[in-house]
Amino acid sequence: MSTLDSLSPGDLVLVSNRLPYTVGVSQGSVTLTPSTGGLATSMRPLLEKGVALWFGWPGLSEEQAGDAKDEINRQLRTRGVVPVWLKAEEVENYYEGFCNATIWPLFHYFADKAVFNERYWDAYVRVNERFAEEIASRYPRGAIIWVHDYHLMLLPSMLRERLGDDVPIGFFLHIPFPNFEVFRQLPWRAEVLKGLLGADLIGFHTYDYMNYFLQSVSRILGLEQELNVIKYGDRLVKVDVFPIGVDFTGLRKMALSDDVMRKVEEFRKRLGGVKVIFSIDRLDYTKGLPERLRAFRRFLDKYPEFRGKVSYVFVVSPSRERVEEYARLRREINELVGEINGLYSTLSWTPVIYIRRFMPNDELLALYRLASVALVTPLRDGMNLVAKEYIAANVDRNGFLIVSEGAGAASELVEAIIVNPYNYDQVADAIKTALTLSAPERQRRLSALETRVSSYDVMAWASDFIESLKGFKKYQLDSAGEMSRRRLAGAALSMVMSSFNVSSKRILFLDYDGTLAPFAPLPSLAEPDPELISLLKSLASLPNTKVVIITSRSKVSIERLLPIQEIDIAAENGAWVREKGTWKNMVTTKDLRWKDEVVKLFSVYVKRTPGSFIEQKDYSIAWHYRNAPESLGEGRASELMDVLSRFVAIYPELSVVRLPKTIEVRLAELSKARAARYWLDRDKYDFVLAAGDSGDDESLFASLPPDSVTVKVGSGPTRAKYYVRSPMELRDALKKLSGVSH
Ligand code: GDG
């Protein structure tokens, strides 16, 4: 049983700008026609079974609906659909404005066409809020919420605010996510990213789109990420790739139906032996329609032997008619078609058969079946379903597919002929190749394409997304559950406080960066605030209580940050210990010639990685890259790790440690565990506490006596007994301890 079949009523909430039904109103009577398109086709059965509830805009303004609104609401509701109404002004500013005149061009790399208008943005926020209100007021507890596409990018966070952390929210982007250089132009880029990060799972069609998104998240919001999981405050957000498919079986069945067969015969007769190159697109500048006509003209110029033998059936269905940009495009297409037909037509042959209307499904399927070439050459396209539909419906395998490298589909349909849509010569050659491909070659490549398109069809796509969302949500809740079960708060904190209170000799080992103070862009900037200083002082002034700062910082830097004589310090992971104000060196290794070599090696990486820098300590050298561009920094860090692994092979006294945004080479004999032993071996303590946030602290946690209070700051697996969420939360706990006894 597939994931979709196993869903029960109330399990799924779908949200998209448009609904899976097209609403028609004529003379007061209301009609609902099922919309075509992958999402609608794959999800409609779930609606019909009552499994899903679908929120969306009915496609006409409240003003246009007028008195018919109640009847539209009634008819939609009986089908499990909840309409979210837009006023005429919102259709203009939100839909035609921010969605179609800002995001659509920008995300398809037509930045010069993108309009940045605050009125559009305000309407976008308002409409997303309206969706959030509607959904929150009818949300069936426990349901998965799946939000679709660029019209609703703020919705995930708005829902998260209203419904809380436990609700599984997924988001899928159907269009490309552009690279950082393009995305950064959006004045509301941070708001859009934060809006999306309200989701638990964010899906894209291709690896490129996903990586571009991750890059923007890192460079604009500065968030950490690991293995496609972003750390966003307390929550984890996963991103992944789900290339949408088509209803392969349904299309194939339809292509083989009698109705379609009849149409095929009818068209064949009318064409009189002329072969067909076919394309169908919504009228849109992203689809490369003028470019494609020019490429076809080049084909006729370059290969005159095909004149009279091949016609291009060029179908353009109307879309976004009210936008001026589209009217201009229509005029350009008219001119080009006129020019080509004027130049090459004969009495018995028309080169371009231009159809500018919505094409009924049976005609579309018939054309897929008889086309010798499907010419799918958008300039940019999230995926492009036409390419996949052609593979499903060309049941006689009598044609071949040309796909643009600008379509997401190109990264999957690798056996097709892949072209650059701006390279007219290449497209003209591709048409010739497709028309003359040998039968065995065509069979071989088509069969591979069919296998791929049929195995990851639209149902598999939807199941995969929902399954991943459920799986990730479970993991997220389990780890959050684990964290909250082991949280140093409430009863756990009271217990720790009372054992602190009754103990006669106490020691606290506290890491500094990320534990007592949050991370700063430069180590020298991680200044403590006055509250921290006074907290440490008051802890250290408690009777029989020792406070030890245990850090990988150098002794100079930690002393500068914490000029408190009452505390002890282990600097450089125990290379130096300071007790009662006196420093003592703990290192046994004498030969330090490796340091110059490491600095030399790191210097090469500093030059090649802007923003990175070296920190030199007595027994360790660190390369910090938290201020370098994300992808460059991580790439260089991996390269450097590789170089260092060979380097330390000849210096067994060294170890290489990869810390967050830092690589450190240090003496292997140093560790926080060994540093702590310095104090523990020389005195008996009946209360031991250690707090830290990174891998370095884990060795310390593991080495302490079993009844010690060990505290991990932040999420992630740990050997510590307790968690706190942030340095601030640790401070609160320490404040409580400092007030316990004197
Ligand atoms: C977005 C992304 C992504 C078109 N005209 C007629 C007609 N169609 C059908 C096609 C196909 C669908 O509409 C168009 O889908 P595309 O994928 O090509 O493009 P968008 O509408 O821009 O969709 C896109 C998609 O979302 C899914 O994630 O692939 O990249 O832009 O199914 O067949 N169908 C009929 N008559 C027409 O005149 N019957």
Image: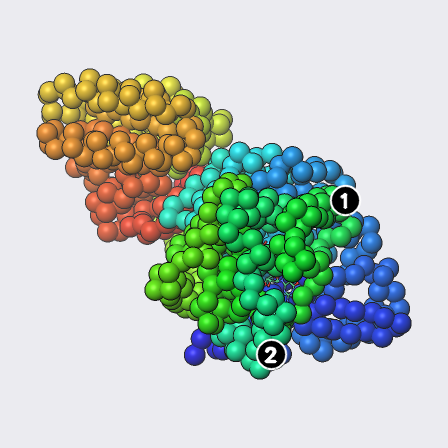
Mark 2 near mark 1, Cβ–Cβ under 8 Å? no
Q: Is mark 1 within 8 Å of ligand 1?
A: no
Q: Is residue 562 above or below residue 107?
A: above
Marks 2 and 1 sit apart, C-alpha to C-alpha, by 39 Å
Q: In the depicted view, which residue is nearer to us: 469 or 330?
A: 330
Q: In the depicted view, which residue is nearer to us: 177 or 511?
A: 177
Q: Residue lying farthest front?
A: 347
Q: Is residue 359 above or below residue 708?
A: below
Name the residue carrying label 2. Answer: 262
**Does label 2 or label 1 sit earlier along the sequence?**
2
Type of the residue with mark 2: Arg
Task: Return the x and y of residue 591 as percentages of the image width and height.
Answer: 11, 20
Task: Return the x and y of residue 55 as percentages of the image width and height.
Answer: 67, 65
Identify the secondary structure beneath mark 2: helix
Q: Quadrant of residue 335?
A: top right
Task: Return the x and y of residue 376 as percentages of the image width and height.
Answer: 53, 54
Q: Residue lying farthest bottom?
A: 258
Q: Is residue 346 visible?
A: yes
| Labels 2, 1: front one | 2
* Label drawn at residue 324: 1
Q: Quadrant of residue 38?
A: bottom right
Q: Is residue 295 visible?
A: no
The residue under the point 16% across, 29% down is: 647
Type of the residue with mark 1: Glu
Rate crowding at label 2 as few (under 14), some (14 to 19) or many (20 or more) other CA atoms within 10 Å.
Answer: some
Q: In the depicted view, which residue is nearer to us: 389 or 540?
A: 389
Using residue 613 as the reference point, say whether residue 14 is left or right of it.
right
* Label drawn at residue 12: none
The residue under the point 76% across, 52% down is: 321
